[in-house]
Image (tube, grey):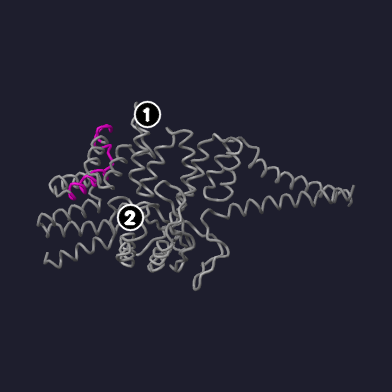
């Protein structure tokens, strides 16, 4: 009887613990998070805690998208109109830490029919460099406290030309 | 002592099992609709996605679950996954989801053609009503998409239909007048452009930095630099007070930024105004 009771206690405790931890982990893990093992020299998130989404904490670029666009197109120069002749959308996802330092950690593309699309390797790397050249990130804020957050930049490409930066 | 300890152990077992049962109930046993709400309230987490997966496993025709599951993917730039899910919802119930998809194609991707196709299809499915995807008159959205793709004639026609389908012009989003004004400016029709910017300003209680900004640009074209500078100053002031139009997710059409206003002012000052 005593053994059964102890076993029951152990089992019920482990079950409750496992379920609680599993749900807690699933609640913490958010879609579009930076992979845990992601490393980039000279970049780290400020906190161990939550990394917010840009639309919740207002992560921005100095001078807004107007300046961001100008800098990206300035960096690309004639290349902006002479990429491989493909059409679709290429999205770079970045983490912007509380000090305004940024790191790209994901690139995802779709073609004009919304099918997953890798895009030309050169296109991907040229735009990567352009996004990486952006330096005036303004971290998102919760109250007055600067926080880590995620943001993305989407290039709309039409026949190898950048038609829009979203 | 032995009895007390046994009682204590049994109580703990009851608490642990009760808690476990409660968690399992939330995920697997509670009514579908409540599980849906729980998943929707935790949007973006893996738990929410798992709950939607389970809902859809049990009921593959639950179109709203596909729709709701798609939302965080699109908000976070994974458009392949987002639209794959959303397409399923549209397939199951086009009337319920075409409007949102059409609006999203315009808003997030500036896929104007795709937006127009979706909205036109929705319109043809519901001939008896004026659709309002995401609370916005369908003709207004069509106008925005036509304008963004440079089809000004199509945009002006859509905006006209927007006004016709509202009770009167006070029900119209003042932004429409801004968009119309920008179109007329682009076409070199500065008179009608200014009329529209004034209407936008009127319906905004004179607090639209955009309407002042674009009106000033029209005035510059008409050679009225000094008056333009005055309006730009007002635009700047309103902008700095936070009256500029913006959106948490995307840039809105015709949105202006501080350096833009400052540059226009500097250019006019450079010309001696």
Q: Position of residue B107 (x, y in %)?
A: 36, 47
The residue that mark 2 highlights is A164
Q: Residue furthest top?
A: B128
Q: Residue at x 17, y 50 (%)?
A: B185
Q: Is residue A76 above or below residue B71?
A: below
Residue assigned mark 1? B126
Chain to which the residue tagged by mark 1 belongs: B
Question: Tag 2: Cα neighbours inside 10 Å, few (<14), some, or many (≥20)?
Answer: some
Question: Residue B180 lies in magenta, yes or no?
Answer: yes
Residue A1 in the image: state x and y as whole percent. Answer: 90, 47
Looking at the picture, tell me which residue is in the foreground, B133 or B167: B133
Q: Please identify the dominant SS of the magenta region.
A: helix
State the quadrant of the C terminus of chain A: bottom left
- Give A68 or A154, whichever is nearer the viewer: A154
Q: How many marks do you count on the picture?
A: 2
Helix, strand or loop at label 1? It is loop
Q: Which residues are magenta?
A: B163-186
- Is residue B128 rendered to the left or right of residue B53? left
- Judge whether residue B68 is colored magenta: no
> Is A97 located above or below residue B65 in the figure?
below
Pair 1/2: label in front = 2
Q: Secondary structure at mark 2?
A: strand
Chain letter of the residue carrying label 2: A
Residue that appears at 53% across and 39% down: B65
Q: Are marks 1 and 2 on the same chain?
A: no
Number of the label disc, if any, that sits on residue B73: none
């Amino acid at each position: 009887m005593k053994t059964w009771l102890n076993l029951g206690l152990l089992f019920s405790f482990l079950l409750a613990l496992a379920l609680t931890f599993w749900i807690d982990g699933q609640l913490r893990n958010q879609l579009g998070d930076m992979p845990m093992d992601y490393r980039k020299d000279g970049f780290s998130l400020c906190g161990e805690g939550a990394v917010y989404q840009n639309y919740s904490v207002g992560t921005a670029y100095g001078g807004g998208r107007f300046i961001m666009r100008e800098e990206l197109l300035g960096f690309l120069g004639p290349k902006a109109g002479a990429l491989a002749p493909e059409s679709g959308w290429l999205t770079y996802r970045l983490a912007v830490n509380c000090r305004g330092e940024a790191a790209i950690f994901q690139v995802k593309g779709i073609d004009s029919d919304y099918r997953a699309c890798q895009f030309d390797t050169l296109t991907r790397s040229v735009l990567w460099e352009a996004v990486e050249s952006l330096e005036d990130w303004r971290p998102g804020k919760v109250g007055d406290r600067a926080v880590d957050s995620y943001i993305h930049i989407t290039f709309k490409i039409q026949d190898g030309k950048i038609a829009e930066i979203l | 002592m032995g009895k007390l300890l046994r009682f204590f152990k049994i109580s703990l077992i009851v608490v642990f099992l009760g808690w476990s049962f409660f968690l399992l109930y939330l995920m697997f046993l509670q009514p579908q609709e409540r599980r849906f709400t729980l998943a929707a309230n935790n949007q973006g987490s893996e738990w929410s996605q798992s709950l939607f997966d389970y809902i859809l496993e049990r009921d593959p025709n639950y179109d709203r679950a596909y729709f709701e599951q798609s939302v965080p993917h699109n908000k976070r730039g994974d458009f392949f996954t987002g639209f794959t899910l959303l397409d399923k919802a549209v397939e199951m119930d086009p009337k319920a989801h075409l409007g949102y998809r059409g609006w999203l194609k315009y808003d997030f991707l500036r896929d104007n053609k795709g937006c127009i196709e979706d909205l036109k299809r929705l319109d043809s499915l519901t001939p008896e009503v004026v659709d309002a995807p995401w609370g916005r008159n369908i003709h207004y959205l069509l106008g925005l998409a036509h304008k963004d793709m440079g089809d000004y004639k199509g945009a002006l026609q859509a905006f006209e239909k927007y006004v016709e389908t509202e009770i009167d012009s006070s029900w119209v989003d003042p932004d429409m007048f801004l968009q119309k004004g920008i179109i007329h400016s682009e076409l070199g029709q500065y008179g009608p452009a200014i009329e529209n910017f004034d209407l936008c300003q009127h319906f905004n209680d004179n607090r639209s930095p955009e309407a002042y900004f674009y009106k000033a640009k029209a005035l510059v074209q008409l050679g009225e630099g000094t008056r333009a500078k005055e309006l730009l100053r007002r635009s700047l002031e309103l902008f700095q007070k936070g009256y500029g139009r913006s959106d948490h997710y995307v840039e809105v059409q015709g949105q202006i930024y501080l350096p833009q206003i400052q540059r226009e002012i500097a250019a006019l000052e450079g010309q001696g105004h």
